[in-house]
Image: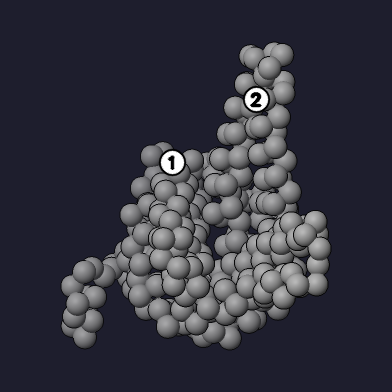
């Protein structure tokens, strides 16, 4: 299933590259606004206030990025379902999900901060007096951080597809991760590779970092949706396990192409 996800993500990005580049640049601009405001305010602030200002600006940029990610997921959903779409869908997604997307990002920030501080607190403070309990609790908090990070891969498309709030999106994402841990572990590896590429090549950070990540997330969500739909249909018909899932590759434009189609697209 991971190989199909990667293939779908590649052809989604290939077919809609221009739109994704434009939306990625718009998203980068929205995320940069709080940071630019903080830079402009530097000359008017005392040194003691600067860390708090830049912390607030960084949080605002993260929340803007979270809203853009859900709006992007809404746009990519249209690409998957209709094989077509426009940048207008991104702005429609922003109108619909801006506040909920920001709330989703805020939830991840707060819970993530609590878990990270718990890893440090239990290991350094509790562990000094009670090593077994301290390091055990620290390890639990660390694994909770990993789990939270994996759910972040499914939450934006879950919100866009199900039209739910941040709690509903995180709950659904958590259930998906619990049911498909190896799939999401593989997905996380590729998400980290995208992030590393964006950090190493600054132009990608502005032009093509958020878009490919969201495309990957949406492709993964689509594969899971097809899998669960096929399993549910098979069980309703009385089929017994193991159930073979047919992803209908032959009739899917994003799954039935190969390297030859990229070199000679007119021969498809």
| 149 sits left or right of 36 in the view | left
Residue depicted at x 69% and y 71%: 39
Q: Is residue 109 above or below residue 60?
A: above
Towards the viewer: 12 or 24: 24
Q: Which mark's residue is nearer the viewer, 1 or 2?
A: 2
How many numbered markers are drawn? Answer: 2
| Residue that numbered label 1 is attached to | 182
Q: Position of residue 153 (x, y in %)?
A: 54, 54
- Find numbered disc 1 in the image and state the secondary structure of the residue it sits on: helix
Q: Is residue 240 above or below residue 173?
A: above
Residue depicted at x 69% and y 52%: 109
| Residue that numbered label 2 is attached to | 123
| 14 sits left or right of 112 in the view | left
Towards the viewer: 232 or 124: 124
Spatial CA span between label 1 and label 2: 28 Å
Q: Position of residue 223 (x, y in %)?
A: 44, 58
């Amino acid at each position: 299933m991971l190989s199909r996800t990667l293939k779908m993500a590649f052809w989604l990005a290939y077919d809609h590259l221009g739109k994704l580049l434009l939306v990625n640049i718009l998203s980068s601009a929205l995320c940069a606004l709080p940071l630019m405001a903080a830079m402009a305010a530097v000359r008017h602030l005392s040194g003691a206030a600067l860390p708090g200002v830049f912390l607030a600006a960084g949080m605002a940029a993260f929340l803007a990025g979270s809203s853009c990610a859900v709006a992007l997921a809404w746009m990519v959903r249209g690409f998957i379902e209709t094989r077509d779409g426009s940048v207008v869908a991104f702005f429609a997604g922003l109108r619909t999900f801006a506040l909920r997307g920001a709330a989703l990002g805020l939830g991840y920030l707060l819970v993530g901060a609590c878990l990270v501080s718990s890893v440090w607190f239990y290991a350094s403070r509790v562990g000094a007096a009670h090593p077994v309990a301290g390091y055990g609790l620290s390890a639990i908090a660390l694994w909770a951080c990993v789990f939270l990070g994996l759910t972040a891969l499914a939450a934006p498309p879950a919100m866009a597809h199900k039209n739910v709030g941040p709690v509903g999106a995180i709950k659904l994402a958590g259930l998906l991760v619990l049911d498909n841990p190896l799939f999401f572990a593989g997905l996380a590896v590729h998400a980290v590779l995208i992030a590393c590429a964006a950090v190493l090549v600054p132009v990608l950070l502005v032009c093509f970092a958020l878009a490919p990540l969201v495309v990957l997330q949406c492709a993964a969500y689509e594969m899971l949706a097809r899998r669960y739909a096929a399993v549910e249909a098979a069980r309703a018909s009385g089929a017994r396990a193991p159930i073979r899932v047919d992803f209908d590759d032959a009739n899917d434009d994003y799954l039935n192409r190969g390297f030859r189609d990229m070199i000679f697209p007119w021969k498809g």
